[in-house]
Amino acid sequence: MTNKRTLVIGGTGKTGRKVVERLSRLNRKVRVGSRNANPAFDWQESSTWTETLVGIDQVYITFQPDLAVPGALEAIEGLTREAKIAGVKKLVLLSGKGEREAELCEQVVINSGMDYTIIRASWFNQNFSESFFLDPIIAGHVALPQADVKVPYVDTDDIADVAVEALLDETHKGQIYELTGSRLLTFKEVIDEIARATGRTIDFTSITLGAYSKMLEEFGVPSDYRWLINYLFTEVLGDERNMVITHDIEKVLGRKPKKFSEYVEEVARSGVWNPEVEVGEET
Ligand SMILES: NC(=O)c1ccc[n+]([C@@H]2O[C@H](COP(=O)([O-])OP(=O)(O)OC[C@H]3O[C@@H](n4cnc5c(N)ncnc54)[C@H](OP(=O)(O)O)[C@@H]3O)[C@@H](O)[C@H]2O)c1
């Protein structure tokens, strides 16, 4: 068996760092793609892509910030072209479940002439501990729109396990996997579960998308990021087809997805959801 060299773009991110860890544990050759790696890789600077692709056999692609944003399609087209020229044989693309724009990017990978696997993931559990929902949870006040929508959150441990399988096993060639967890949860249900596990009081308020957008603006969130949040809350959460549990994790890994409660217990134990205690302050 040859030891293929894998480039993990976003190799320090939520799924990418876990893919790097798993491949390294298996003694596979791996290169991290990030603006802080050497050589550096920046989606905004196509001149950085060529050097990162030298000697690479396969690529796990996570795009930033999202495959739905303007310019993503052109970036995926450009990277795919360069990867082929560099002699890359296989692409595994992390995509978003229920995003029409992301599906256009998937088509570029599918038609690239290289082997491929597409991983369409639902919203990550880790959005509550490593991303935009973390700060309000720490503050104890969460206000979000689409309060009645039920989301089948998926854990990045499972996504990374599926990505590694797709990178290492030929049988996943040409497959599109849709990954969800095993429970459908509203935001309130998530916040209640986190509050119980941490022993904290965290209140949840249902607000309109307009009010949420205005709140983000007041907090100084840049307009392109607000556009993306608006897109995700309308296109992804607004589509009932995304409120469905799939079984592709079990199909690929031969086991059930990680339970949401397990994720919550792990993060609660780590202390990430607790407000920082000032030095000298009594607890
Ligand atoms: N979050 C979700 O719920 C979700 C659900 C489905 C699909 N997805 C998809 O997953 C992908 C990754 O999203 P994520 O939220 O999980 O992010 P993430 O992987 O946690 O993003 C951080 C990673 O991206 C790198 N990065 C940031 N800006 C970069 C740039 N300009 N050029 C190169 N690398 C850059 C960071 O490294 P440096 O900072 O060192 O550059 C880091 O490795 C997105 O395409 C998203 O659509 C996300």
Image (cartoon, grey):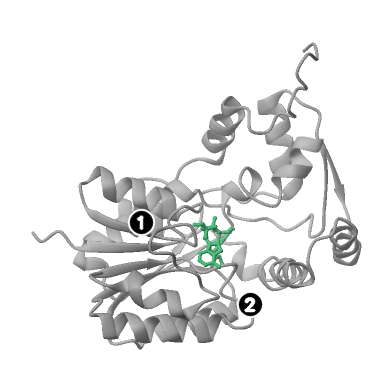
Q: In which quarter of the image is residue 193?
A: top right
Residue 194, x across and y down, in percent: 68, 34
Which residue is pictured at 25% across the width and 76% down the height? 88
Q: Mark 1 points at which residue?
A: 162
Residue 196, x across and y down, in percent: 70, 27
* Marked residue nearer the N-terminal end (2 or 1): 2
Quadrant of the rendered image holding ligand 1: bottom right
Which residue is pictured at 43% across the width and 46% down the height? 157
16 versus 172 height, above or below: above
Q: What element carries label 2?
A: loop
User: Given the current orientation, which residue lies at the most extreme top position?
Assistant: 282
Q: In which quarter of the image is residue 249?
A: bottom left
Which one is in front in this view, the residue at disc 2 or the one at disc 1?
Answer: 2
177 versus 22 height, above or below: below
Would residue 266 be visible to someone looking at this image?
Answer: yes
Q: Does the residue labelled 2 lie within 8 Å of ligand 1?
A: no
Which residue is pictured at 26% across the width and 80% down the height? 86
Q: Mark 2 points at which residue?
A: 69
**Quarter containing the C terminus:** top right
176 versus 249 height, above or below: below
Q: How far apart are marks 2 and 1 (CA)?
A: 25 Å
